[in-house]
Amino acid sequence: MPKARMRQAVRQALHDEMQRDPTVVLIGEDIAVAGGAFKATEGLLEAFGSNRVRDTPISETAILGAGLGAAATGLRPVVEMMFIEFIGVALDQLVTEAAKFRYLSRGRITVPLTVRASAGAGQGFGCQHSQMLDHWFRATPGLKLVVPSSPQTAYGLLRSAIQDPDPVVFLEPRALYGERAEVEYGDQALIPLGLGATVQHGDDLTVVSAGQLVARALAAAYGAPWSADVIDLQTLVPWDRTLVLESVTRTGRLVVVEEAPYSGGWGSEVTDFVNGELFGRLQAPPHRITTPDTPVPYAAALEQAWLPSASYIRTQIDELLVSGRRPSPWWQQEQETST
Amino acid sequence: VTLSTQRERRQRLDQPLGLYERMLEVRRAEEVIQQMYADGTVRGSTHLSNGQEAVAVGIAAASRPEDTVTCTYRGHGVALALGMTPTALFAELAGRRAGCTGGLGGSMHLSDADIGLLPTFAIVGAGLPVAAGAALTAQVLGTGNAAIAVFGDGATNIGAFHEALNLAAIWQLPVVFVCENNLYGEYSRIELTTPVSDLASRASSYAMPGVIVDGQDVLAVRDATAEALGRARDGAGPSLLEMKTYRYSGHSRSDPAGYRLPGELDQWLARDPVMLYRQALLARSDATEAELATVDAQVDAALRDALAEALDSPVPAVRELLDDVLSGGGR
């Protein structure tokens, strides 16, 4: 299999969908002539022409609104938000309008709109260009939410997102654009939305993660005195309850590793569900390894501490397995030390 | 509701008497809605468009059923003009299954794909970029269709207006932006919120025609809209039409409109669009008093029947609220 960086896998997914379906169009800032700020659309203008690959002004409301209007009337648009934060000025079009069209038309108007965005921390972009912001979308019925973790999943999930009849928010961890791995292209590589993937099998606990932290969860498990099912959730809405429940039923322990502030993070949905289903049958309390409830700091040492590292994940799981109690997060220990 | 009924309703707008009939129907239907609200049949709020009937009917007369329309929460008139039946409208407001969205939407969220009406927008300005997107579909696929965005004067101060006009202009999209300037954005008079009195002038920032239209004259509305739609279909790009009009009611049911200037309402009532067109039909001998009286009686009878039919329709089953959130059922 050929090796590709995630940005190339994204580009290939867009290319393949545009070739398959003439109603797929791309709309976004600097995506056509410049090939995208992260070079994920490079060459697509040349391949498909300016009618289908369109640069826009810096007008996120118009971009999202046009995407909605186009999707509701026969196109299958993929709009790019260069940084997911930019959607803040245009949120109305997605959560208040696009998410309601199917409902308000009794299913007669569908919105096959894909909103791609770079997201997440790790590259020193500072607090206004480093968030995942998945929680802005998770609590809005009518949207789907997908987070790839690798070139392969970016390719397979993005193609499925574009083919999906509903609005899909597709958060590409920008720290992974340069990641290189073997990728299988083609229709057989599509990954259905709503399904997680068990990327490693083990017996002592279930680790559920998504996005760029999947690789760190795997690294944490490498050489550990315990073995874990590591599940890449892939789709956060709707998420794969069946896969997670099956795994935790067998392992008896659940740890969620998420790139999200502790309060309101997606992992609380997972732990709540598992707690409710398996109450009294777990060998340890479900545990969430998250970021602190702070903006993303800039300095390298601070940002590295902010995002759960493989060694931090390993330490937390070690402690959970030894004590049977939930370990405190690092920031709580820091705060106790300073007072 | 059959498609043919809606199409036939739209086609009647080709006739002078059809324009009159529809404007009167909108006026009388909103009187029915006021009563439905007063007796508790309608929940929440309603935003009446009485006084603005010529705009709704004129736009519908100029456009095709294949065109896409985005409209505001003040949309009873536009929906009826585009062909929605009074039964579907009344039933929607009463929260019945025969409503245009089966009772899921209500007054502010009327919708029918068959008449080109996207779910109406209850957020000021939100429909403009969406209309640009519908026009993008027409442009990319080469369908020859166009889009119309209907919005109020208040929307010209929100970012979505400016972003949508700008995008439509640089892409030369086949879209017509129709501003119903009724002089008040919610409870505030336009002078308090807007530094220009002719909103059509805002088109100059986006290098598109900005046309002031007498919004009380249904033929002026129809002809100006037809010309702008013609430009759009010819690839000459978007236009901004400013319909000078007035709403007789307050912003919503809870607003008595005490902020109006003294005498203002009477001045506008003297140019009532339904009355003006009735007089024009008589003056041009396009209709006789007897014919108009027949239409008046027919409209009232049809609305009575429609209301009875709407209230005969069952309340939706509770499980229906779970449908159509995402494909494949609920969440």
Image (cartoon, rainbow, N blue to C red):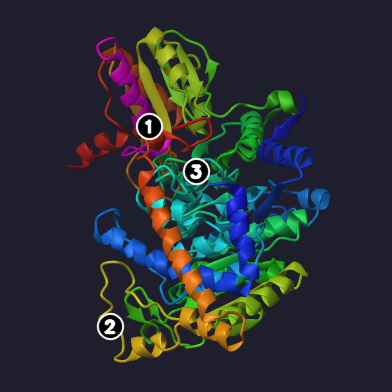
Q: Nearer the viewer, mark 2 or mark 3?
A: 2
Question: What residue range appears in magenta?
Answer: A259-282
> Considering the numbered disc 1 on the image, is that residue within a helix, a strand or a loop?
helix
- Depicted B276 relative to depicted B19: above or below: below
Q: Earlier along the polypeptide chain: callout 2 or callout 1?
A: 2
Asked if the magenta segment contains residue A266, the reply would be yes
Give the spatial CA distance, label 2 vs label 3.
Answer: 49 Å
Q: Which mark is residue A120?
A: 3
Chain to which the residue tagged by mark 2 belongs:
B
Residue on which disc 2 sits: B259
Q: Which residue matches tag 1? A: B319
Q: Is residue A102 above or below residue B115?
A: above
What whole-number distance in Å separates the C-alpha atoms at marks 2 and 1?
44 Å
> Identity of the amino acid at label 1?
Arg
Q: State yes or no: discs 2 and 1 in contact (Cβ < 8 Å).
A: no
| Residue A334, placed above or below residue A27 | above
Amino acid of disc 2: Tyr
Coordinates of residue A124 in the picture (x, y in percent): 50, 49
